Structures are given as structure tokens and as C-alpha cells.
Image (tube, helix red, strand yellow):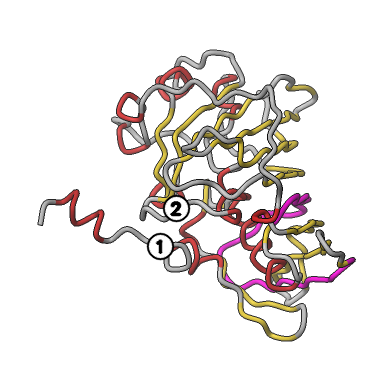
């Protein structure tokens, strides 16, 4: 069987992919869940923030009566590490169309003391029940065709900041936002890419929580390198994405005092804006 046909035959389905297995939680008690954070979603030795958002999102989807995240606000308190973690959830309010809950992800230090890694407040609903009326001035990002874009595997040398997570993503970056990889950052705080999961699994509301924080940081195109840890991230999921690759565009307009914002938009194959986010991140200057 040709390699392309073989890959197509192995295409993962929602519910049966590496992403689903690595975000799966096991209920220990009402509102309490166990998970083993996978090392496959690390970047510069820290667990990726979008993956962690999806992990907590899955726990809240189990704890709340509504299926889909509408808005998720996360404060990243300490860096998460691969390995066992505990998630505690609390139902704040339930209503007819929306329910709200909070969740904390806990790990343990060498002395066995609890260390809170992330705290989340989220509202859930049913995206399928929303009306079709859309009134927007937003436009999909102008990204060249996928065959004219480049991924980590196209680099002649390891790309700064790349790590295990890149093996789990289908990531094709717009050449106009790739100057940093060639030692010639543009100075513009922009990053654009085609995005998907490497095993071919289509996107769903939970994987959109990964998509908003899975591209290289815009700080690279500002001429900065190294880890850019998220302090706070708020994601809005606007619609269930259509099958096919996503397009993600991220911009930064202001870096001041060692912090920058990143505004992300995620568009599906039918030119619908399916997710948005804003985060505050810390950068290392000098």
C-alpha cells in the first residue's frame, strides 16, 4: 500500500486518537479526577499550556451538565511536569443554557506537598443548540496554500523552542512569519499556520483549546528566544469546527515590562471563526 494511502487508512477518529488518550481523566470521587500528564506534549521541558487547558476542559465536561466549553479562563500558577496529577472540580452554577464550574490541577513536590499548577473558571453550553445567525467583520487569515508553508520537519536544523509536541501536530507555518527560524526575525508580532493533529483526527471544541496555544510564540518574530510562559489565558469557543485543517493566526501588539499579550483566532475549513483567545505571557529580555 502506498505510504499516503496507508496514512489515510490510519487516520484517527475523535475519541480514538493520541490527543484523546492523553487528555483522558479517571474519576476518583465526585468532582475529583486523576490523569497522567504525557511527556509527548512538552515544549522546552514544560507541559504545553494548550494541552493542559484541554485536560482541564475534559474534566469539566464530565463534571458539568453541558458538553461544550464556551469560555475558559486559566491562570497558570506554576509549571506543570509530565507525570501524575490530580484535578479537583467544583460546580458553581447550572442553568438551562449555560453551566459554570471551576477546576484546579494539582501535582506534588518532593516532600509530598500539594502544588497547584493551574486554576480555571469556565462556562459550558451546547454549541449545537446555538442559532446560525452570524454578523461579523472578521476575516480569515491570508495564509499561502499548505504546500507553500513549512513545518518543523522542513528545518535544516532544530528550531529553537521545538520539542516533543511538534511530533503530535500537523503544523505548517506561513513563510512570512518564519524569519525567526532563519535568524532574521521580522520584528512583527505575528504567527500564522495551518494546524491539525498529526494522526489526522479532526478538530472538536476540546482540541480548539489546544489550538489557541500550540504555535511558536510571537516573541520569536520580535527577536526574542526561549520559553514564553503563559500567565493567564482566556479562550472562547464559538462553534463546532468543520472537518479539515484549521488556520490559526496570532498577533502581539504590545510588549512592555517583560510581558506581552497574544490574541489568537482559529478558523475552520468553511471559513468560520471557531475559537478566539487572549493570553498574557512573560518574556525573558536581554
Q: Residue at x 87, y 65 (%)?
A: 95
Estimate the x, y position of residue 66 in percent, counting from the top left.
73, 66
Estimate the x, y position of residue 284 in percent, counting from the top left.
67, 31
Q: Please state, as top left, top right, bottom left or bottom right, where the C terminus lies in the image.
A: top right
The answer to whether 17 is drawn above or below residue 257 in the figure is below
Contact check, label 1 and label 2, Cβ < 8 Å: yes
Estimate the x, y position of residue 137 in percent, counting from the top left.
68, 22
Estimate the x, y position of residue 240 in percent, counting from the top left.
59, 50
Q: Which residue is mark 2?
A: 202
Q: Is residue 70 magenta?
A: yes
Does residue 47 appear in the picture of this structure?
no
| Element carrying mark 2 | loop
The stretch of residues the image draws in magenta is 69-93
Circle 1: is it few (<14), some (14-19), or many (20+) Cα within 10 Å? Answer: some
Q: Main secondary structure of the magenta part?
A: strand
Q: Please state, as top left, top right, bottom left or bottom right, where the N terminus lies in the image.
A: bottom left
Q: Which residue is mark 1?
A: 13
Amino acid at each position: 500500500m502506498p505510504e499516503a494511502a496507508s496514512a489515510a487508512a490510519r487516520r484517527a477518529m475523535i475519541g480514538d486518537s493520541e490527543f484523546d488518550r492523553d487528555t483522558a481523566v479517571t474519576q476518583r470521587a465526585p468532582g475529583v479526577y486523576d490523569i497522567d500528564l504525557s511527556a509527548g506534549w512538552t515544549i522546552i521541558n514544560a507541559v504545553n499550556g494548550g494541552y493542559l487547558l484541554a485536560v482541564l476542559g475534559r474534566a469539566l465536561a464530565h463534571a458539568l451538565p453541558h458538553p461544550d466549553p464556551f469560555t475558559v479562563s486559566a491562570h497558570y500558577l506554576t509549571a506543570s511536569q509530565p507525570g501524575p496529577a490530580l484535578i479537583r472540580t467544583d460546580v458553581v452554577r447550572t442553568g438551562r443554557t449555560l453551566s459554570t464550574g471551576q477546576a484546579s490541577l494539582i501535582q506534588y513536590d518532593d516532600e509530598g506537598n500539594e502544588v497547584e499548577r493551574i486554576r480555571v473558571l469556565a462556562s459550558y453550553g451546547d454549541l449545537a443548540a446555538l442559532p446560525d445567525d452570524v454578523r461579523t467583520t472578521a476575516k480569515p487569515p491570508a495564509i499561502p496554500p499548505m504546500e507553500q508553508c513549512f513545518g518543523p520537519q522542513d528545518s535544516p536544523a532544530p528550531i529553537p523552542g521545538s520539542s516533543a509536541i511538534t511530533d503530535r501536530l500537523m503544523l505548517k507555518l506561513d513563510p512570512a512569519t518564519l524569519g525567526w527560524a532563519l535568524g532574521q526575525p521580522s520584528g512583527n508580532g505575528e504567527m500564522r499556520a495551518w494546524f491539525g493533529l498529526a494522526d489526522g483526527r479532526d478538530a472538536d471544541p476540546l482540541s480548539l483549546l489546544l489550538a489557541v496555544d500550540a504555535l511558536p510564540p510571537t516573541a520569536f518574530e520580535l527577536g526574542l528566544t526561549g520559553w514564553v510562559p503563559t500567565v493567564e489565558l482566556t479562550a472562547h469557543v464559538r462553534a463546532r469546527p468543520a472537518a479539515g485543517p484549521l488556520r490559526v493566526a496570532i498577533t502581539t501588539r504590545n510588549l512592555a515590562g517583560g510581558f506581552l499579550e497574544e490574541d489568537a483566532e482559529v478558523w475552520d475549513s468553511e471559513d468560520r471563526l471557531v475559537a478566539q483567545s487572549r493570553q498574557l505571557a512573560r518574556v525573558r529580555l536581554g
